[in-house]
Image (cartoon, grey):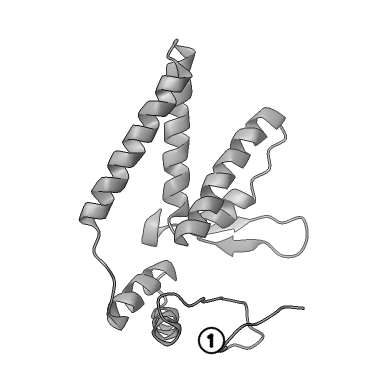
Amino acid sequence: MGPKGRTVIIEQSWGSPKVTKDGVTVAKSIDLKDKYKNIGAKLVQDVANNTNEEAGDGTTTATVLARSIAKEGFEKISKGANPVEIRRGVMLAVDAVIAELKKQSKPVTTPEEIAQVATISANGDKDIGNIISDAMKKVGRKGVITVKDGKTLNDELEIIEGMKFDR
């Protein structure tokens, strides 16, 4: 979990196994035979996907938190607790955690700070961290950065002014 997460090998129905440290990739690969358990797995996949879309990182942490919240909630409900009250309590706790995280957070503004954060998200790869920092410097805070697999051994930064349409 976090920047020191472990590498996972995922068996695929075709091709070679996938090697990753990314929680959302692991979550997407889970498909259970029991349809009821699979519904729960799909809910956790939604948590991982939403976290990835919103923050771009932290999917494993979000998955662990979702599992813990669900487990505790179901346990309380099975002992007679009101599900609506459980949800209300969870939402109050979420609001409190968000407020506390905002108090503790520090804006990342300099290219060096951006490179540090990007390096952590890139599993410690400083070259990737620096490329992302350069990209952010060039496109600005409201610009869009897209990461794609390349066809060469070298990492590249390509800046496209205006719009780009995929065919």
Q: Is the residue marked by circle 1 packed among few (<14), some (14-19), or many (20+) residues within 10 Å?
A: few
Residue found at x 38% / y 80%: 126
Residue found at x 67% / y 28%: 36
- Image quadrant occupied by the C terminus: bottom right
Is 65 drawn above or below residue 119 in the view shown? above
Residue 91 in view of the camera = yes
Say whether residue 107 is left or right of residue 124: left
Q: Name the residue under label 1.
A: 155
User: Which percent across, then down, holds residue 52?
Assistant: 51, 57
Q: Quadrant of residue 118?
A: bottom left
Residue found at x 66% / y 35%: 38
User: Which percent across, then down, holds residue 2?
Assistant: 38, 57
Of 46 and 156, which appears nearest the observer?
46
Q: Total marks drawn? A: 1
Is 85 drawn above or below residue 130 in the view shown? above
Q: Quadrant of residue 141?
A: bottom left
Is 122 drawn above or below residue 11 in the view shown? below
Of 36 and 6, which appears nearest the observer?
36
Of 114 and 18, which appears nearest the observer?
114
User: Which percent across, then down, holds residue 103?
Assistant: 21, 53
Of 92 and 28, which appears nearest the observer?
92
User: Which percent across, then down, holds residue 63?
Assistant: 48, 45
Say whether residue 166 is left or right of residue 141: right
Residue found at x 39% / y 81%: 133
Residue 75 in view of the camera = no
Label 1 sits on a secondary structure element that is: loop
Q: Which amino acid does label 1 sit on?
A: Asp
